Image (cartoon, rainbow, N blue to C red):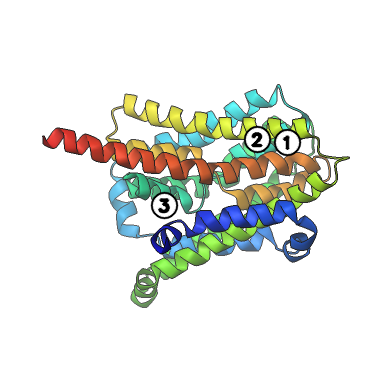
Amino acid sequence: MLVFLRQRWFLCALLASVSLALALPHVVHPWTQELPPQLVVALALFLMAWTMPSRSLAGELRRPWASLWAMAISYGFLPGAAWLLGIVAPADVKIGLLLAASVPCTLASCVLWTRLAGGNEATALLTVLGCTLSSWFVTTFWLATTTGTQVEIPAATMMLDLALTLILPVALGQGLRLSPAGRHFADRHKRPLGVVSQLIILAIVLKAAAAVGLKIHDGRELKVDLLLLSGVLAFGLHLLALYVALWSSAAWGFDRPRCLAVAFAGSQKTLPISLMLFDRYFIEAFPLAVVPLLFFHVGQLLLDTFIAERMKHAAMAAEIVEAL
């Protein structure tokens, strides 16, 4: 039991936190409403960049094709699919799906899930970095293009927000690794710093879950059909992107570890950035857009845990068969 809890502590904490926030939102919301998404995102990204091994990234840069394909899935296929699904959805659901799909790859979980499945971590790391550094332009482009007729988006302001929130912390974190002392500290304390990053992500999930919980308890705003539609579309969108990324990368001829990295890095998205943009630009016009946001991000963590374990067991079985 202790081994299970140690290996699944984040998943257990996620389920417990979301359940608490949905059941008792009036208790949780006062503690999370003042949580500044922009500052939280910057801190999580700084910690991720500080512990990101530059040598692994340098090696992957010599063969960046898998990472570039993961970025194409993340910033091309996924937002396009969200826009198409949004045609049959209410406005709030459409905005929530577009917000979830247009932001960069998730900060750390795609690397953890890639590792769990037996994939190439360096490919996932390079995808995270590439998506993060290009988000100031790509995310702004997608949201301005697909939602511009429904809400006024100050594109220049959004670009500046994303640049300061994403690029600056990564530059500071990688800059600290140039110092032998800073690099040694980060490498020596990689696990506790990773736990802090996960707790930060958990706090953002709790904030979003509390907001959804308030909507659920106020039945005048959130109807059951919108709740169910949000869940089905958000889960379906993530699974569609994951398996399209997996099958297409295999068709391109990438090796199995890189295919797994493309699948997770291309389909997972970061909640803190989505929530930050929602709070800044969409909350007044589309308050229920937070519902598909929560479904997408909690769903990807839950679903990918089981998918990664299944992929790892399948790979192990294939190795045994080849050895016989």
- The amino acid type, in three-letter code, at marker 1 is Leu
Q: CA distance from mark 1 to mark 2?
A: 6 Å
| SS for callout 3 | helix
Q: Nearer the viewer, residue 43 or 115?
A: 115
Residue 189 at what x, y percent from top left? 39, 72
Where residue 280 appears, x then y in whole percent?
Answer: 75, 51
Q: Earlier in the sequence, mark 2 or mark 3?
A: 3
Disc on res. 112? 3
| Residue 165 or residue 308, whichever sits in front | 308
Per the image, the residue denoted by label 2 is: 231
Residue 125 image offset from top left, x and y in percent: 40, 50
C-beta proximity under 8 Å, tags 1 and 2? yes
- Can you see residue 28? yes
Instruction: Determine whether, in the image, residue 206 is placed left or right of residue 245.
Output: right
Q: Residues within 10 Å of mark 1 (few under 14, many from 20)?
A: some
Q: Which label is found at residue 227?
A: 1
Residue 177, placed above or below residue 156: below
Residue sitting at the far left: 324
**Secondary structure under badge 2?**
helix
Left or right of residue 189: residue 160: right
Camera sees residue 173: no
Q: Amino acid at mark 2?
A: Gly
Mark 3 closeness class: few <14, some 14–19, many ≥20 residues within 10 Å: some
Residue found at x 78% / y 64%: 30
Disc 3 marks a residue whose amino acid type is Leu
Which callout, 3 or 1, points at the residue further toward the start of the chain? 3
